[in-house]
Image: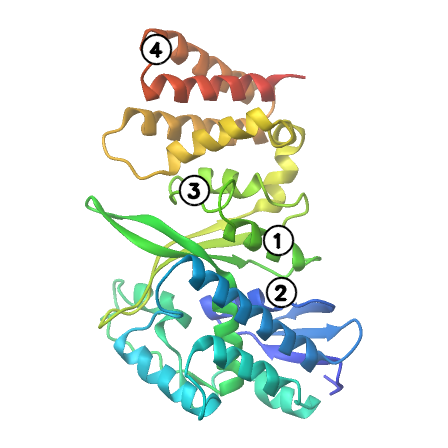
Amino acid sequence: MVLDERSVRIALPLGVARYYVLTFISFLDGVEAAIYGDHVDVRTVAGSVAERLAEGMSVAARALKKYNERWKGVEVPASGNDKKIFVSLMRHLLPSEEGTFFNALVAYSRRLRGYRPQDLAASFSRFGEGDFSLPSIFKPEHYALSRVPFMRGKERYDVKVNLDYFMLLLAGYVLSRVGRVMYEAGGGRREWHTLHVLPYDLGASPTRFSEIVKCLSQEGGWSLPPGLNPEEACMLWLAMTAPDDAPDVILMSMKDPRGTEAAKIGVSYYLPLKSFIAKSGRALMKIRKDERMADLLRRLLQKALKPAVADKAHDRAVELVKLLFIALQGGELERAELLLRASRIEAMKVSEEKKDEYWVVHWGRVLAEKIAQR
């Protein structure tokens, strides 16, 4: 690749770190980007690519500040080992300032503006070379994947990166966070996880991805889903606010590191929004454009997604959401099946109008009638 001030080649690692890089690129204005195997080429429409990268770091700094104003707590979670890495980072970037991640991103943004093409090439063209180890939030899949047959669970992941690539991953991590959700950890245990939305690919319009993140990060309405199961409900939740040409995304929950515990992935869903919206077409639009129908669907999804134990209304909501998911993408037969199922159950429950299960079935029946209309 020829070095010039309008372009840069960035190496793409494997695992979650890859998607942090793609997240950061998706938030850059005025650039064109394409993936070629193990790297991505970024080129500006006009102006310096160093300036665009610096602006991206500033966007990440603002996102970090806004996130922590809403979700009170540490700026970036860390285990005991992770903290040692972050202390070293702060010494390099902020020798005479308060060592906050917000200040680190702002300082690095200023630093990037002075980079020449050869500086950018040295900083981002290779992954796995440098002085900084990766904290567990950059490699959460490693812990989970090492706890499988034929592996002892003690394998080390000793990849190191330079300061520039470290800050690239940090910015991607910050920009992918949308909030905190309750995760069912099994055995009746529940725990709070940080929810991340990651781009599966860059696609034709990377900025469409940032629109999804911004929508989920807001308060009220179709913001954060109240839970993460079933997967079909998560798909429907995102599809209700995603643009028509939405890219495919990965929805990942992460248990934050603390003390001796490293970061760990809870769920990781590949959500093919692009094909789902295309297949659902007019049926989905009927719900999206009707305020009452959209409200009923949100109530149904909230009931299905909210963690519950021995709750008939919750179980019924999950059943109807799964049928609705199929019906939206299917034809007249699938939609008739949903309508028949919901109508029969509603007739059986009509004497229980004051109970949650009746209203769940009622919402399902009304939605089924809506999408069945020609």
| Point 32% across, 11% down: residue | 352
| Point 37% across, 65% down: residue | 141
Q: CA distance from mark 2 to mark 3?
A: 26 Å
Residue corresponding to mark 2: 27
Residue corresponding to mark 4: 349
Q: Where does the image place residue 221, in percent across and percent down from the top left?
A: 51, 40
Q: Where does the image place residue 319, in percent across and percent down from the top left?
A: 39, 27
Q: Nearer the viewer, mark 3 or mark 1?
A: 1
Q: Bin the neighbour count of mark 4 within 10 Å (Cα to Cα): few under 14, some 14-19, many 20 and up.
A: some
- Amino acid under disc 3: Glu
- Residue 110: quarter of image: bottom right
Mark toward the start of the polypeptide (4 vs 3): 3
Q: Vertical placement of 73 versus 250: above or below?
A: below
- Amino acid under disc 1: Glu
Mark toward the start of the polypeptide (2 vs 4): 2
Mark seen at residue 231: 3
Q: Is residue 353 left or right of residue 53?
A: left
Residue corresponding to mark 1: 211
Q: Where does the image place residue 84, in percent across and percent down from the top left?
A: 32, 84
- Residue 23: quarter of image: bottom right
- Amino acid under disc 4: Lys
Q: Is residue 87 left or right of residue 173?
A: left
Assign the N terminus to one quadrant of the image. Answer: bottom right
Mark toward the start of the polypeptide (2 vs 3): 2
Q: Bin the neighbour count of mark 1 within 10 Å (Cα to Cα): few under 14, some 14-19, many 20 and up.
A: some
